[in-house]
Amino acid sequence: MPKIRLQKYCSQKGLASRRKAEEYINNGWIKVNGKVVVELGTKVDPEKDVVELAPQAKQEQKEFKYVLLNKPSGYVTNLPQKGERQARDLLPPNLGHLKPVGRLDKDSEGLLLFTNDGVVAHRLTSPAFEHEKEYIVIVDKVISQEILSKYRKGIVILGKKAKPVEVTKFKGTTYSFVLREGKNRQIRRMLSNFGCKAVKLERIRIACLELAGLKPGQYRLLSKKEKEKLLAYI
């Protein structure tokens, strides 16, 4: 098997994102076959070489927290105005310092990720990485095939052409929208452009993270397996 860069290996194995692995290498916090590595161009054999994180890196990662919340409608993710309720308030005090990754508008509900890992937050929100976000949307009327075709090719929103959107029709007026960017109120604007309105909008997936199992207002920490999967995914 050909050798690969150490950063890529760490990402694939869920040890750290590539960017974080580069930081660890610069700090001398990664060992390969028992020897500290400080060269960013170092390559390893995934089948033969043994890669270990130094105690400093492991301790730093212990301090990273990742929380999934099922945000109910009526809560805001940005700074609340007078009388508004903030999604962060649904978390216990010991997790209140975590920041939401991206936004869900006040009338929308569903999956929100909270974390203090800046690298993960950047990777999931930057349009350059095109990570998927999936929504189940109930619309006030059936969307014509002509309009669906336009969504799939990309339409102009806020003066710029949006990236193509995967749209799948379910039963009645229920649709799945899969976005690869996060323009302000994108789905609602897409619908409004053609005289439609979202009756209910729920985000059910962010990249490899899924809402399943969480009732509105409930939260949970990512499992070790989920964290490894997320780091490898991004």
Image (cartoon, helix red, strand yellow):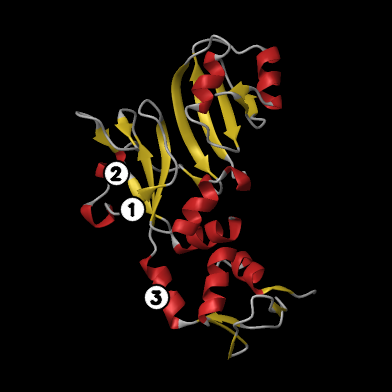
Question: Is residue 141 positioned above or below 171 on the image?
Answer: above
Residue 215 in the image: state x and y as whole percent: 35, 38
Q: Closer to the N terminus: mark 3 or mark 1?
A: 3
* Amino acid tagged 2: Arg
Disc 2 marks which residue? 88
Residue 168 in the image: state x and y as whole percent: 63, 26
* Amino acid tagged 1: Leu
Query: Would residue 166 appear left or right of 26 to someone viewing this image?
Result: right
Query: Would residue 77 appear left or right of 143 to someone viewing this image?
Result: left
Q: Between residues 81 and 116, which one lies in front from this camera angle?
A: 81
Residue 17 can be seen, yes or no: no
Disc 3 marks which residue? 59
Q: Closer to the N terminus: mark 1 or mark 2?
A: 2
Q: Which residue corresponds to the image point at 62% horizontal and 22% vertical from the top-left?
A: 156
- Contact between marks 1 and 2 (CB within 8 A): the answer is yes
Task: Count the numbered circles shown.
Answer: 3
Residue 70 in the image: state x and y as whole percent: 37, 40
Q: Closer to the N terminus: mark 2 or mark 3?
A: 3
Disc 1 marks which residue? 98
Q: Which residue corresponds to the image point at 57% horizontal and 28% vertical from the top-left?
A: 176
